[in-house]
Each structure stands twice: as C-alpha cells, then as structure tokens.
Amino acid sequence: MGNWAAMTAEGSFPVEPAETAGDKEFHVGETRVILLESVASTQDELRRLAILAPGTALCIVAQEQTAGRGRSGREWVAQRGAALLLSFLATPAPASVQMTPLAAGVAAAETLAEFGCPVRLKWPNDLIAAPDGARCKLGGILCEQDAGLPGKVLVGIGINLLAEAAPPGLPATSVAAVAGRAPSQEELLCALLPRLQRWCSLPPSSIRKGWLSWQTGLGESVTVVMGKRTIVGEALGIDEAGALLVREGDVTVTCPAGDVHLQQSPRHAQKKAGDAEETPMPKTI
C-alpha cells in the first residue's frame, strides 16, 4: 500500500473507527484522514463517524471494501490494494449541491492528468480512459446525502490503480495500463484531496465550465435510462444544475439523473492505441 506509516500522526479521534488492526489517522491539509485496512463501505463508515463527530473534515480510505457500492446500489468490487477507495465529506455551496458529482469528477481528472493518466468524464459519474482506442471505465463517483448531515455530501470515489482492480469481462482499465505506471495510493490521495475541497466549494457556473472541459459523449448519440423511461437522442450539454440535456426528436429532454450508454462513433472506434485525443486535454489548475 505504500509508505502510509510515514504520513501518520499520533492523535485520537472522538469515536472509534471500524474494527481493524492497523488503522491509522493523519491530516491532508485540514482534512482528517482515517485509513482502514478493511471496511464494509467507506460511505457508510464516513456517514457513521461524521454524524458522531460533527464539524470534523473527514476522509475515509480503505484497502478493501467488503460491501462497496456504486450508483443505484450496484456492487463495487476491487482487489485488495489495487484501487484507491475513499469517501470524502464535502461542504458544497447550497446552490452547488447537485453539481457535486461533476465537481468531484473534475478534481479526479485534474489529479490523474498530473500523473500522466489522461481521462475524460462521462455524465454523470464515470472516469473514462481509452488506452487502446476504446473507451473504458477507470473509476467512478457516488454522491449521497443524509438527513443527519445537513449541508454535507458524502463523496465516494473508486479509482483503478492496477489491472487487478478492473473487473474481468467489463470495459474497464487502470491507471497503470493508461500511464504505464500507477502512483501510490498515498500520492494520489494527497494530490486529490485539495482539489476535491476546492472544486466542491465552487459555484455551479465554475463547476459546469470545468466539467465541460473534460467531458466525453456530448455531441454523440446516447441512450439514457431514467427509471422506467428510456431516452434515445443526441447529448447536447448540461445545464446549470448539472442535468444532462438530450435532444430526442424535436424535443430537448432534461435528465437530472440516469444511466448513460454511449454509441461508439466510427471515428472513435478506429482510433489506435497511442493516438491523440479528439480534442486537446485541458490544462490542470
């Protein structure tokens, strides 16, 4: 897992973290990071500790999740030590709460680019890379709110660092596959947390602009599944609340949430490994 011990600092937390030997605590800026060897879910552990210790800036990191989940309750599986698995307690501006998944995506994209791993953001919560010309999932984001934590958003992020983290049989990839090497978990975490704090605190217009500079899929044919409704059309953009805008026939449909399936364009499908992206990668801030 890297030299986490060099980063730890002695101190006590007002409540006990989840049961595991070898748990550690340290700070990244003002954020208290609790490192767990194993936990059922970083989201659930963050929720538990945040309610018991209000006012504490928190991040939970785990080597292993035994009951990790993604959007819509889907199982999130990663081999022990092969991914960065974290949950961060964000305090977005009231007007930006619905934009938090997009803000977290921009923070992750900037951070990964710093380590030589160019990614794109697929609405609403996927980190996408194309090491062999085909778009593959590199990671994902899950944002949740809790009535016991007013004004807060629990931001869960999973990033595949090594090939072992990518589920077999799925179009997934890893930082190592894209960049040639993967940073250590602690390197990536320390670079990511300040960006998460910054992007999650920005106004909607800034988040929207940032997300658009990293997006993939706009201008393409998409299928959006929203509950029992399926929308097929062209992805036009996102509005100031972060909803996806899709042209279906002569109507523009606003999709505040849903699962998006991109139709692979012939141009994208014919790209070879090592080819440049269709549009220049934005500079990180």
Image: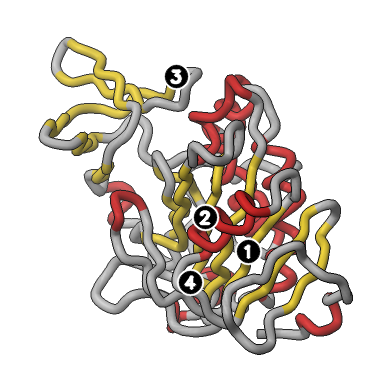
Marker disc for residue 156? 2
Q: Nearer the viewer, mark 4 or mark 2?
A: 2
Mark pair 1, 2: CA separation: 9 Å
Q: Secondary structure at mark 1?
A: strand
Can you see residue 118? Answer: no
Q: Secondary structure at mark 4?
A: loop
Q: Secondary structure at mark 3?
A: loop
Residue at numbered disc 1: 60
Of callouts 1 and 2, which one flags the residue occurring earlier in the amino acid sequence?
Answer: 1
Can you see residue 266? Answer: yes
From the image, which quarter does the N terminus lie in?
bottom right
Q: Within 10 Å of the Cα at label 4, are there few (<14), some (14-19), or many (20+) other Cα atoms?
A: many
Q: Position of residue 225 (x, y in %)?
A: 19, 38
Q: Which residue: 53% across, 57% down? A: 157
Marker disc for residue 239? 3
Mark pair 3, 2: CA separation: 23 Å
The answer to whether mark 1 and mark 2 are in CB contact below 8 A is no
Q: Amino acid at mark 4?
A: Ser
